[in-house]
Image: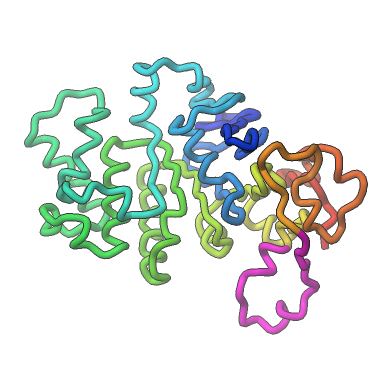
Amino acid sequence: MSTPLVEAVNVKKYFKTPRGLLHAVEDVNFKIFEGKTLGVVGESGCGKSTLGRTILRLHEATSGQVLYNGENILEYKKREMHKVQRNMQMIFQDPYSSLDPRMSVRALIMEPLEVVGTGEKLSKAEKREKADRIMELCGLPSNHANLYPHELDGGLRQRVGLARAMILEPKFLVCDEPVSALDVSIQAQILNLLMDLQDNKGLSYMFITHDLAVVKHISDQIMVMYMGQVIELATSDELFKSPLHPYTRALLNAIPTIDLSRRNREKVTLKGEVTSPINPEPGCRFAKRCPFASEKCKQDPVLKEVAPGHFATCTMGAK
């Protein structure tokens, strides 16, 4: 079997707070192969964005390993990490706040060439030419090169963010809710662009979102997180066909539908308070809201392979 392009091994990320340690990411494991997309879903505050930033070392992991082509990049020094950053880039959620309002579109796209570089010496003219090629690749009109972020709509700003990431010719992109701030029609354009780039460039994605309809459209595998813990992992088709964890079923039930037959299906109703991620007690963090909770939920959950390629910490939500 081929080596994963990116692999997380027992990754943890804790933050110090006045009240104690906030367990944002807890023992996360996954593999992303070349040309594939891992969707990461969960409600706000579940740790999915923190996980993405930790994988890229925008946050330093508390413990664990992040393997890129089989090598643990968490052990890399600054110079070694500088080289890896060419191959691992991020698209941020807010396409406006992630762009410097004082820089033109072309300058924003060229900036990574100045900061990180590609390993080859390029003249100013060559950098401009490269930026113009990337603009065309990402669907940005050439006459927008000298415009500023405030002169663009949300979709064009996100294309600038994508072009800025693509100019280093990366192999792996963390897409942190890249379409959540966009209109539905613009969302489809950006998603189709990401999929076209993946097909043409062989890119691998970690696609972070709270929208299950979006993640089904773009992902090969889907990982469901709750309060820092991975509670289910499966292929996209399998997860939607046979959700096992009660929380996954609740998420799927929340998707709006006009299908009357689906409206009559059994629903999982979530009640109770949300567990605090600060100094959490041992056990399943979903237990206080779960209609199937029992004494055994006080034990720390373990992600087990329930069916080929389908992992879950609990099967009480199985149909």
- The image position of residue 211, as x and y in percent, is 55, 61
Q: Nearer the viewer, residue 97 or 218?
A: 97
Residue at the image position 34 percent from the left and 23 percent from the top = 82
Image location (x, y in percent) of residue 117:
24, 28
If the image is split into quadrants, where does the N terminus sit? top right
Residue located 56% across and 46% down the image: 48
Q: Residue furthest front?
A: 18
Quick check: is 72 in the magenta stretch?
Answer: no
Residue 88, horizontal then vertical, whole percent: 40, 34
Residue drawn at point x = 50 percent, y = 17 percent: 75
Residue 168 screen position, x and y as percent: 28, 35
Q: Is residue 45 left or right of residue 262?
A: left
Picture colour scheme:
rainbow
Q: Residue furthest right?
A: 295
Q: Is residue 29 visible?
A: no
Q: Which residues are magenta?
A: 250-272
Q: Is residue 259 within the magenta segment?
A: yes
Residue at 54% across, 52% down = 219
Judge whether 289 appears above or below 116 on screen. Answer: below
Q: Is residue 318 visible?
A: yes
